[in-house]
Image (tube, rainbow, N blue to C red):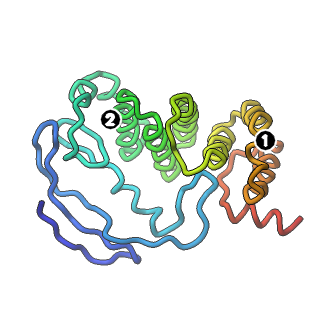
Amino acid sequence: MDCDLGRQHDMTTFYQKSVTCAICNHSQIVKGIASTNSFGSSDLDTRPPEMKRSTMFTWVQVCPSCGYCADDLQNENLKAPAIIKKNKYKQQLNNPNYPDLANAFLCKALIESRCGDFAKATWSLLHAAWACDDREKKAQAVQCRQDAVKMLLRAERKKQILMNHRQEETLLLIDLLRRSGQFTLTKQVIASRRQLLIDDPSLFPILKFQSQLIEKEDWACYTITDAFSEREET
């Protein structure tokens, strides 16, 4: 593998490397992250602050020859060749209504879900939502989050792990529901999982803050700091 260390850019260091697609053997140069930093608070849906926030374009690789989308194009996936030939995949990859980066994550999610990795597909769908947020594609971001909710619930049914603790996964689910406007369902989730959440006192301020936002039918993006600042004000 050919690697070329790049220059530091806003405290994030990138490098370039040559990768060969495991499906069609096309070679290309891609960027990777050598190091990065985060300053500030993550969003309630776990999106990191800058500078890591701006490295998202390196989280998915796209083969310009066959259209394969993956964390690493060199990783062989036996089911991917058939998946990327399907019309649904091709249409998503070239969907003009979505940003290119979002299309890449959505195609990655298609492969992951067809392979039964619903937890990983949930993250790809959420990353697609973030890409839509950045381009102010509100309707598309909502759709990505709605799909992420369905995928997260599938992952739970299969006992696949998204995060370190079930409470954290539930808080992520609540934010996905709220930011996609599914307020009634959000209230139902909070009611059914309230005991799980209040068993961890450190998470209660976030639950309280989310409940307040839901009552106001507030779709907006908020950070973890916002939730704890609300506690300090009250």
At x 72%, y 63%, the residue is 226
SS state under label 1: helix
Residue 184: give x, y in percent of width and height.
76, 31
Give x and y (percent) for residue 227: 74, 60
Q: Amino acid at mark 2?
A: Leu
What number is the disc on residue 194? 1
Taking depth in this image into account, of 26 and 72 the one nearest to the observer is 72
The local crowd at label 2, few if under 14, some if 14 to 19, many if 20 or more residues have their Cα within 10 Å, is many
Task: Tell me which corner region of the image, top left, top right, bottom left or bottom right, holds residue 94.
Answer: top left
Q: Which residue is mark 2?
A: 93
Query: Counting other residues with Cα less than 10 Å from the Cα at mark 1, is it few (<14), some (14-19), or many (20 or more)?
Result: some
- Residue at x 49%, y 39% (from the top left corner): 122
> Residue at position x 65%, y 53% from top?
221
Secondary structure of the residue carrying tag 2 is: helix
- Inter-mark Cα distance, 2 to 1: 39 Å
Depth check: give the residue in front, 77 or 140. Answer: 77
Note whether residue 95 is visible.
yes
Q: Position of residue 29 (x, y in %)?
A: 17, 57
Relative side of 71 to 4, left or right: right
Instruction: Give, as a three-letter code, the residue at label 1.
Output: Arg
Closer to the chain start, of discs 2 and 1, is 2
Label 2 close to label 1 by CB (< 8 Å):
no
155 sits to left or right of 111? right
